[in-house]
Image (tube, rainbow, N blue to C red):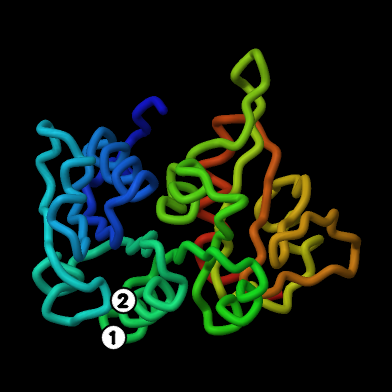
Amino acid sequence: MSAQPAVYGRTVHFVIMGCGRVGSMLAGTLEEQGHDVAVIDQNPAAFRRLGATFEGRRVTGLGFDRDTLREAEIENAYAFAAVSSGDNSNVLAARVARETYGVEHVVARIYDPGRAEVYQRLGIPTVATVRWTADQTLRRLLPLGSVPEHTDPSGKIVLADVPVHADWVGQRFSRIEAVAGARIAYLTRLGEGMIPGPDTVYQEGDLVHVVATSDQIPVIEQLLDQSPPPA
């Protein structure tokens, strides 16, 4: 993957739990983008996946242990990704990051897709293993300046997963389109794609996929990353 610009030109701190194939790929990609990264794993040997050029922090321990998280500077984290091999550990760590340390952007890797709905109701965005890619993870962790899902051959039209502020829950997608000046191509709800109708409302955990010109995406992201204006 090619490097993407930092979040609004800022270098921010990411904490990743799990240094397997996905975790090491995320760490390397985020560092290439100019961000500061700390990686947590129980097994120190796992850090070999990061390579000799990785300059981020390597923290040995459990990703839901508070001392371990503090060593990884969770208090300064912009986002937290739990991508270890255990569903329960990933969700527990993600909840600690969000509920104890107030990290807004979290994502947990899930091996059992049947649990996804439960975790989504707990406010923890999840991605099932069968649908897992590093690009999907980056789109969840980097809601501003995110990675496009598709770009047409001219490079002008993009399909992007654009995060929506929680205060939009219960609002019709028709209003979201009107406020953002965007066309919603489709949404993903509990792992299933659907095309929103005129009365479809935004629900917690929905992934909103917008089609727009490349120069419109930053504006759309800014509009939808804040509370909706008064009706």
- Counting from the top left corner in percent of width and height, residue 182 is at 70, 46
- Counting from the top left corner in percent of width and height, residue 187 is at 74, 56
Q: Quadrant of residue 25?
A: top left
Identified at 67% across, 21% down, the residue is 152
Q: Secondary structure at mark 1?
A: helix
Identified at 22% across, 73% down, the residue is 62
Residues packed near mark 2 inside 10 Å, few (<14), some (14 to 19) or many (20 plus): many
Q: Quadrant of the C terminus?
A: bottom right
**10 horizontally vs 133: left or right:** left
Q: Is residue 107 above or below residue 7?
A: below
Q: Amino acid at mark 1?
A: Thr
**28 horizontally vs 89: left or right:** left
Q: Is residue 179 above or below residue 27?
A: below
The Cα–Cα distance between marks 1 and 2, rounded to whole angstroms, is: 6 Å
Q: Amino acid at mark 2?
A: Ala
Identified at 21% across, 56% down, the residue is 39
Q: Which residue is mark 1?
A: 100
The answer to whether mark 1 and mark 2 are in CB contact below 8 A is yes
Residue reaching furthest to the right: 198
Q: Nearer the viewer, residue 58 or 112?
A: 112
- Counting from the top left corner in percent of width and height, residue 27 is at 27, 45
Identified at 39% across, 25% down, the residue is 2
Q: Which residue is mark 2?
A: 97
Q: Quadrant of the N terminus?
A: top left
Residue reaching furthest to the top: 154
**175 horizontally vs 123: left or right:** right
